Amino acid sequence: MQTKFNIPETDRERIVIIGAGFAGLELAKRLAKSRYQVVLLDKNNFHQFQPLFYQVAMAGLEPSSIVFPLRKMFQRNKNVHIRVTEVDKVDVEKQQIYTPIGYLNFDYLVLAIGADTNFFGNERIAEKAIPMKSVSEALYLRNQILSDYEKALITPDYDQRQKYLDIVVVGGGATGVEVCGSLAEMKEHILPKDYPELDCDEIDIHLIQSSDRLLKGMSDNASQGALDYLTKLGVKVQLNTRVKDYDGENVYMKDGSSIPTHKMIWAAGIAGNTIEGLPADCLVRGNRIKIDDYMAVKGAPRVFAIGDIAFLESEENPYGHPQVAQVAIQMGVRLAKNFKAESKGKLREKFEYNDKGSMATVGRNKAVVDLPNWKFKGAFAWFVWLFVHLFSLVGFKNKIIVFLNWVVNYFTYDQSLRLIIRPKEKKKILKK
């Protein structure tokens, strides 16, 4: 196999990073001016800010405002090389990776390949449900919601119209809660203006959660607060309810009940992306890669894993660290420091997670925040959520655009982003 990477061989040790999510990007940024040659691989040429996917789906933000081009970020760093490709296989012994554009040698390999939607083996749900783990999926959901409202407008039959109007969200984590809150506000403030011919009271938003509480990883105060906010917004929350199947027309629960709808948003779990060639015993629950305290993959000392894909077991975290952005960023920071230390002949340090807290928003002036020594909710929590997410965005221009969008939305409850944008299909030319 020939290689088409066109990356020069130098006397610098080469670190190949697969994935430009929070973990991989943070590592690449920290190593941009180091003694290493850094190769960053991703299937996209941009970084995606996942916590705001739901706002793209709900027509609150444009996709371009929460992504940032990788090449622009590293324009001045000549030792950072970016290639847009996927990785098919890893050869740990030969220290090579194999991709559609050829193979590439590495001195160190960092897997920051993240996670994707977990459908728990249900193929029909995987085919029919709508996930939200990328900008393209969020844009697809936006198109689907707006298209169905257009169809509902011209559907006289009540039962058929309900399937276009009603939405089921599966999963009561932060994503599910934030999507439902945004949908409820759209129902109350936006749809009556856009679709005055529709009876918006017919729109039902369902949130299905398999456990007995929302926001399972947060405090009881946050969980109950989110439930109270959603209930006041008119969301129909069903706890201790497990979805069994979905055929594109009806959502079926294990208790025998069902909900008719053309849209089921799946936010019920994630599973690690897989890559061939790793030691067989390094994969654990949810396809995560087992690592040691220095983030090296068990059985492959020159291969590291960070972010959502990494599983580091400890007494404090017997099930691994939570798969959230803060863990990924802190892993990227520590691994970069360890690489720099090693290049200077110093010892590496163990990874220790500093839990800075967690938060979720339910709507305008409604959010819940868990800090290590303070738990609160309401309008102040909402402003804290806005501040943290705004300053976590990559790129000054993105920060300004998102801030302006939020200000306009706050005072007007309106946006001009409710556009149905589909890829153009080429017309087939029939030969005579």
Image: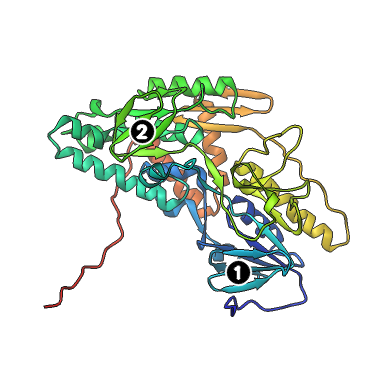
> Is 188 displayed left or right of 255 in the figure?
left
Judging depth in this view, the residue of 118 and 181 nearest the camera is: 118
The amino acid type, in three-letter code, at marker 2 is: Val
Closer mark to the observer between disc 1 and disc 2: 1
SS class, disc 2:
strand
Residue 159 spot, x, y in % from top left? 19, 30
Is 31 placed above or below 324 here? below
Q: Kindly state the secondary structure of the residue where label 1 is placed.
A: strand
Q: Any mark on residue 98, and which?
A: 1
Residue in the picture at 41% in, 50% down: 137
Vertically, is 287 above or below 16? above
Residue at (54% x, 35% y) in the render: 385
- Residue 8 quadrant: bottom right
Residue toward you, 70 or 156: 156
Question: Is the residue 164 above or below the residue 136 in the image?
Answer: above
Q: Position of residue 203 (x, y in %)?
A: 27, 29
- Percent across and percent down for residue 254 are 41, 27
Residue 76 seen in the current view:
no
- Report the residue marked by disc 2: 168
Q: Residue 200: horizontal and vertical position, in percent?
A: 24, 29
Disc number placed over residue 421 in the picture, else none: none
Along the polypeptide, which appears first: circle 1 or circle 2? 1
Contact (Cβ within 8 Å) of mark 1 with mark 2: no
**Residue occupying image coordinates x 77% and y 47%:** 292
Task: Give the Cα separation between the discs numbered 1 and 2.
Answer: 40 Å
